[in-house]
Image (cartoon, rainbow, N blue to C red):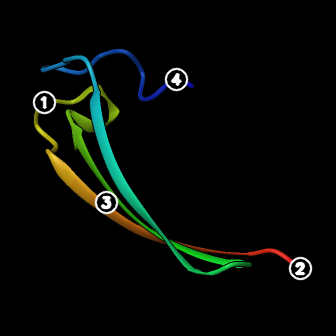
Amino acid sequence: MLVGDGQLPHAAPEAIGEAYYQWQVAKPLALALDYQIIGNPAYNRDRGPISVFGMRLHAAF
């Protein structure tokens, strides 16, 4: 995926770190919590780092 027009004044490599924890609530049900930190989002040193939080619920029938 291309971001921008290639003319960023302070371009830098994007770096992403992620950690998650999954908890088996019951046999057919799992809950996962997720955290991501993104350094230089969209290859721009002027933006970030940013934190992204997420939650997933998985049910099997």
Q: Which comes before the other along the chain, label 3 or label 1?
A: 1
**Which is more foreground, mark 2 or mark 4?**
2
Residue 14 at what x, y percent from top left?
A: 28, 25
Q: Image height check: is 59 above or below 50?
A: below
Query: Identity of the amino acid at label 1?
Result: Arg
Q: What secondary structure is found at the residue carrying circle 1?
A: loop
Measuring 32% from the left and 44% from the top, which residue is drawn there? 18
Real-space Cα separation, disc 3 to disc 4, in angstroms = 21 Å
- Residue of label 3: 52
Label drawn at residue 2: 4
Real-space Cα separation, disc 2 to disc 3, in angstroms = 30 Å
Q: What secondary structure is found at the residue carrying circle 3?
A: strand
Q: Which comes before the other along the chain, label 2 or label 4?
A: 4
Q: Nearer the viewer, residue 1 or 57?
A: 57
Q: Residues within 10 Å of mark 3 (few under 14, many from 20)?
A: few
Residue 11 at what x, y percent from top left?
A: 20, 18
9 lies left or right of 56: left
- Residue of label 2: 61
Q: Which comes before the other along the chain, label 4 or label 1?
A: 4
Query: Identity of the amino acid at label 2?
Result: Phe
Q: What secondary structure is found at the residue carrying circle 2?
A: loop
Q: Residues within 10 Å of mark 4 (few under 14, many from 20)?
A: few
Label drawn at residue 45: 1
Query: Identity of the amino acid at label 3?
Result: Val
**Outermost residue toward the front?**
27
Query: Identity of the amino acid at label 4?
Result: Leu
**Which is more foreground, mark 1 or mark 2?**
2
Real-space Cα separation, disc 3 to disc 1, in angstroms = 17 Å
